[in-house]
Image (spheres, helix red, strand yellow):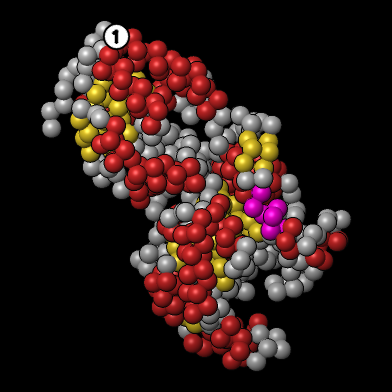
Amino acid sequence: MQLPDPALVVLVGASGSGKSTWAAAHYRAAEVVSSDELRGIVGGGPHDLDASGDAFAVLETVVAARLGRGLTTVVDTLGLDPAKRRAWRDAARAAGLPAVAVLMDTPDVECRRRNAARDRPVPAPVLAGQLRSVRDVRPLLEAEGWDLVVPVRAEHAPEAPAPAEVRSTPDRTSSLGLRSVLQVSRFPWGEDPLDWLTGIARAADEAGFAGLALMDHLIQVPQVGRAWDPIPEPWVTLGAIAGLGTGLELGTLCTPVTFRPAGITAKAAATLSALTGGRAFVGIGAGWWEREHAAYGLTFPPARDRLDDLERAIVTMKALWASGTKAYDDHGVVLPETTSYPRPAGPIPVVVGGSGERRTLRIAAAHGDACNLRTTDEAELERLIGVLHAHCDDVGRAREEVAVTVLDLPVVGSDRDDVWARVERHRGRTPAATYAARTHAATVAGHRDRWARLAGLGVDTVFIATPDLGSPEDVLALRGLNA
């Protein structure tokens, strides 16, 4: 369609819908007045939200001056504020120019994908609100009396290249459609801890794991080992692994909110992101083991209070990772400033650990990027995923915005004899059949069959921790899971 020229053209669409790309393809740079570009001129960069007020003041001045001279003017903002749209329309009419609204009709999933790939993504709840507004805006535009309303379908508009500081990571999704992350929960490192850690991390990278996660405990938990077995502080340990330069994503699964103030965890994760080129994640939960709290002089509030702290912690971390340094006051979190440097080199996914149906899964639905569930029973897993999705619907988030991950604790053997030898070695006083069923004891092929069913339920990522993780060779033996 040939648009009138000269004219006022107002772009309307959510973040990631392709407005700037469309404008650059159809108009000269001097004709496009972009709020992001102006933030970069009057502030520290296009995402410096502290500069928004000054940027919009300049935008209004430039728009008025260009319309007054009868020049084509393309307004590149979200365009979702009705009052601003009507003011620009009236200014065009006063200048004798036609007023055109260009509505970016880009699928929600594509906007979310592009947003997630950005160096400074719009927070998921904010983007969800923009997408809801876009769905409602078409009849409003028709009623506002624009000379022309032009819908633009932008399924695959070209995207800007990834920022240089975010290193490209190969896609490590297996043929089953799953990603797997090695969770290291036991540390039989002998006399040379760093050499052992280095070997495990390099083996995980070679075996095709997408990432490596460390358990966050102060005393080794009885489900894994003895109280006097080593259990290192995870963020220090992840920093050492970051120096290896692997392609692994690195994070915790999971950090209790009772161990550290949320701001300190945010700082650690942002630093890890900067060191890895954007490959950090945070698994976080309400905490559960009272003994380690008492041993280290930490308070252990009631479950309700810990869950309140969990929700506030996620909000706090995301506020500190966002652009700008402005004050924050929302969701029960009040911060006088959000000055936190270094900034993350990429999005930091927050994985909420726990299966509590009323609070934990609702917190994941409202604020998390993923939830982490146990895989003991597939029927129960399917039911919990349904609970999570119901919470997503209730809080107004798209289900696909909250990935489903699982913690898998399997026995994996090379053949049937090896499987049962491992069962006998680890079962203790538990009957062999009971232990084998609980750990889904099987060969790699057997576990791949089970993982295929998990993928069919909607699982995105499997965190795997085996009782046989003693050496790099044990990790390499799992490579077939990632094929």
Image quarter hosting the C terminus = bottom left
Q: Residue at x 20, y 30 (%)?
A: 148
In the image, 119: left or right of 156? Answer: right
Which quadrant of the view contains residue 131? top left
Judged by its main secondary structure, the magenta piece is helix
- From the viewer's perspective, is residue 212 above or below residue 343? below
Magenta-colored span: 306-312
Q: Is residue 483 magenta?
A: no
For mark 1, what is the residue?
68
Q: Residue at x 56, y 58 (%)?
A: 364
Image quarter hosting the N terminus = top left
Residue 94 visible to an observer of this rendering: yes
Q: Residues within 10 Å of mark 1 (few under 14, many from 20)?
A: some
Depth order, front residue of 311/7 = 7
In the image, 172: left or right of 262? Answer: left
Q: Residue at x 68, y 36 (%)?
A: 335
Dot 1 amino acid type: Gly
Residue sitting at the far top:
69
Residue 403 visible to an observer of this rendering: no
Coordinates of residue 192 in the picture (x, y in percent): 71, 57
Q: Residue at x 17, y 19 (%)?
A: 5
> Regarding mark 1 in the picture, which secondary structure is present there?
helix
- From the viewer's perspective, is residue 96 above or below residue 215? above
Which quadrant of the view contains residue 201? bottom right
Coordinates of residue 289 in the picture (x, y in percent): 76, 66
Depth order, front residue of 104/67 = 67
